[in-house]
Amino acid sequence: MSASLDDLPLRDDLRGKTPYGAPQAPLPVALNVNENTHPVPEEVADDILDGIAQALQDINRYPDREFTALREGFADYLGHGLQPDQIWAANGSNEVLQHILQAFGGPGRTAFGFGPTYSMYPLLTGATGAQYVSGTRGPDFSLSAADAAAQVAEVQPDVVFLCAPNNPTGTPMGLDVIEAVYEVSRGIVIVDEAYWEFAPREESSALTLLQGRERLVVSRTMSKAFAFAGARVGYLAADPALIDALRLVRLPYHLSALTQAAATAALRHAPTMLSMVDDIVSQRDRISATLSALGYTPYESWSNFVLFGGVDDPKATWQGLYDRGILIRDVGLPHTLRVTAGSAEESTAFLEALASL
Ligand SMILES: *Cc1c(COP(=O)(O)O)cnc(C)c1O
């Protein structure tokens, strides 16, 4: 016999909450959590293994607490004249976001996001004891600069999440929205660019806004475009003072020597690691076009997934696909489902199964 949560002296503010829990089912076609479904290219895998083997020789010692080589790698990759002292990294961008909330959120403070948006924002916020406030978007999930600024000015949150492009909707966010929100806020403004590499090439990242804005943070991850979700590596760029604040809350040596070695080696091969991005983008656009032809209403996406409306019974459709070996995501938005763009074969399997339902 085992105890239940109610038997434990759990924090009152955590009672009744449910953990993050996208289903993990061993189905042949898994298009539910926006992973890159392509494996790491073999020549890169060999170099990563060499890096890990070298790190193992010193594994009896604590790793470089400041992950210097990895920071240099991220600064190089991001460009825009960024220096290593403007870079932070952690075990997934979820931990990067947690560090920001630990330093700038916490009890008595407020974090804010424009819903529907990434489901981890409220969970991470609540876990630090801060309160999460959800703002709103237009009917097509877009957000104008004036509307966004008005909502933030009203709430005056300590931390604002701007997911660009937005998960789970794929919606792009204009730089004018980010500038306007920064202008009216006094808190930290986080632009979560987890899917940036899938956006149109000619568009400008929020990295171009960092200069002179010491409360602005741009977070990225290796989990999506880099096909590195299992390694757990996320990072951000911001003013060096903000990086100093994050040092106050991180655990000592939070990035293991093995993680640092693997990510540093992978970054040396960034163009190869990102070689599947164009293919994924073309599958995304093909999925959207085919969904339209099937009578569904896909939303504009700058990411590696498509949210589509016009689904009469999302639970039934999700189950029908599941029974055909295809896992997608019901994100809880009425009459919609979300699918990740996989390989050509996976995307075809999804589209054919959906058409057959
Ligand atoms: C996937 C995702 C992340 C990245 O999570 P990791 O912890 O880096 O794997 C961050 N933000 C959004 C919006 C995401 O969808």
Image (cartoon, helix red, strand yellow):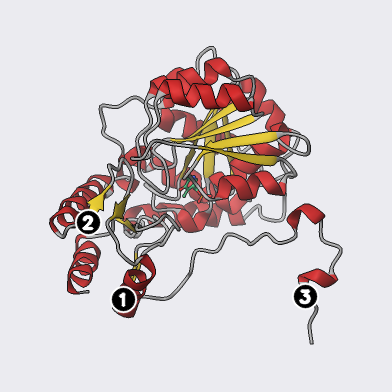
* Residue type beneath disc 3: Ser
Q: Nearer the viewer, mark 2 or mark 1?
A: 2
Answer with the quarter of the image where residue 171 lies: top left
Residue 273 horizontal side relative to residue 90, left or right: left
Q: Nearer the viewer, mark 2 or mark 3?
A: 2
The C terminus - image quarter: bottom left
Q: Are marks 2 and 1 in contact (CB under 8 Å)?
A: no
Say above or below: 196 vs 185. Answer: below
Horizontal side of residue 222 vs 159, given as left or right:
left
> How far apart are the alpha carbons under marks 3 and 1?
34 Å
Q: Position of residue 221 (x, y in %)?
A: 47, 43
Q: Which of these two is toward me, 45 or 344?
A: 344
Residue closest to the far top: 212
Identify the residue under disc 2.
296
Q: Is mark 2 within 8 Å of ligand 1?
A: no
Query: Badge 1 local density, few (<14 within 10 Å), some, or many (20+)?
Result: some
Given residues 323 and 30, the one toward you in this image is 323
Position above or below: 157 against 14: above
What residue do we see at 69% from left, 41% from top? 131
Q: Secondary structure at mark 1?
A: helix
Residue positioned 19% across, 60% down in the render? 344
Residue at image x 62%, y 22%? Answer: 240
Q: Residue at x 21, y 51 (%)?
A: 288
Pointer 1: what residue?
Answer: 320
Residue that carries the numbered disc 3 in the rendered image: 4
